[in-house]
Image (cartoon, rainbow, N blue to C red):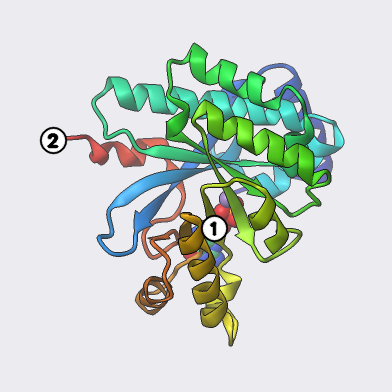
């Protein structure tokens, strides 16, 4: 891939989204698997920007300029729309109805129109909210926890699944597990690598069992790590051992027989 100067990205990705060139933004999908059976139970959508053939840019390059330009909500809505198109296409071509999760910036949970705008898109595409999981990514502060709790409750009432991403790293506090009615947690791969990480994963899994929530361990790269995550009490896993994030077409083999 040819390196692209930062300034070019900054100007271009913002212009691309502002001008509604939504086809240039499309998610790669990474499977989430059941650690016991190794069956794919869903996917995580990881955004890519493809401004020209052969040039594909990942979220860490495109999100900061979009955030600076105040376009986080526009990016979110474009991603939900892309994911709904994939879900609707999969439904109409007889594929197994697997859910797709999408990362949300915590700031958006304070937006009073977040739930209605998101639901409007699923309705337009005839997609059940139960096929969408919203992963709260707390690389930045969540801000108003009460407002976030109201938003998560109303998302759950609409039928969306909601999870806490990278729990225990960044600003993703245990307190949020107590306050936000989420359906599950994703545990950062750092815990697989840390000396005392196994016990922390096992402890979190016990909390989640009591709360009736799922646990997914991310960044699994080896069979030993998959076995450890399962033994520690996680039901699901995600990582290069199972699959790298791929363009959507790769997953066509998951058609129901
Ligand atoms: O926290 P979140 O789920 O949003 O992180 C997804 C990121 O992690 C993606 O950029 C993806 O490419 C990366 N990733 C996914 N699986 C693995 C893995 O097994 N190992 C490593 N090092 N990174 C991974
Ligand atoms: Mn995520």
Residue at point 57% right, 47% down? 182
Residue 242 appears left or right of 218: left
Q: Position of residue 245 (x, y in %)?
A: 46, 50
Q: Residue furthest top?
A: 124
Q: Nearer the viewer, residue 167 or 256?
A: 167
Residue 11 appears left or right of 91: right
Q: Position of residue 38 (x, y in %)?
A: 28, 59
Q: Which residue is mark 1?
A: 186
Q: Is residue 51 visible?
A: no
Q: Secondary structure at mark 1?
A: strand
Select label 2 or label 1 by which is in front. Answer: 1
Residue at point 70% right, 26% down? 114
Q: Quadrant of residue 88?
A: top left
Residue 144 appears left or right of 120: right
- Categorize mark 1 by other alpha carbons within 10 Å: few (<14), some (14-19), many (20+): many
Q: Which residue is mark 2?
A: 257
């Amino acid at each position: 891939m040819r390196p692209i100067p930062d300034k070019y990205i900054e100007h271009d990705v913002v212009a691309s989204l502002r001008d509604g060139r939504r086809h240039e933004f499309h998610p790669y999908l990474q499977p989430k698997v059941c650690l016991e059976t190794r069956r794919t139970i869903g996917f995580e959508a990881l955004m890519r920007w493809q401004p020209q053939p052969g040039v594909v840019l990942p979220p860490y390059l495109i999100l900061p300029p979009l955030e600076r330009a105040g376009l986080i909500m526009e990016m979110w809505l474009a991603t939900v729309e892309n994911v709904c198109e994939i879900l609707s296409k999969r439904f109409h071509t007889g594929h197994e109805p697997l859910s797709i999760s999408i990362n949300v910036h915590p700031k958006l949970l304070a937006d009073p129109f977040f739930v209605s705008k998101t639901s409007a898109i699923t309705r337009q595409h005839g997609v059940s909210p139960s096929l969408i999981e919203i992963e709260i990514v707390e690389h930045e502060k969540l801000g108003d926890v009460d407002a976030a709790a109201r938003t998560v409750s109303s998302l759950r009432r609409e039928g969306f699944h909601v999870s806490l991403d990278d729990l225990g790293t960044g600003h993703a506090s245990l307190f949020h597990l107590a306050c936000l009615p989420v359906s599950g947690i994703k545990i950062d791969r750092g815990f697989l690598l840390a000396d005392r990480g196994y016990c922390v994963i096992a402890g979190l899994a016990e909390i989640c069992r009591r709360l009736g929530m799922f646990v997914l361990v991310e960044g699994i790269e080896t069979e030993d790590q998959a076995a450890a995550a399962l033994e520690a009490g996680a039901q699901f896993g995600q990582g290069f051992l199972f699959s790298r994030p791929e363009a959507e077409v790769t997953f066509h083999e998951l058609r129901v027989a």
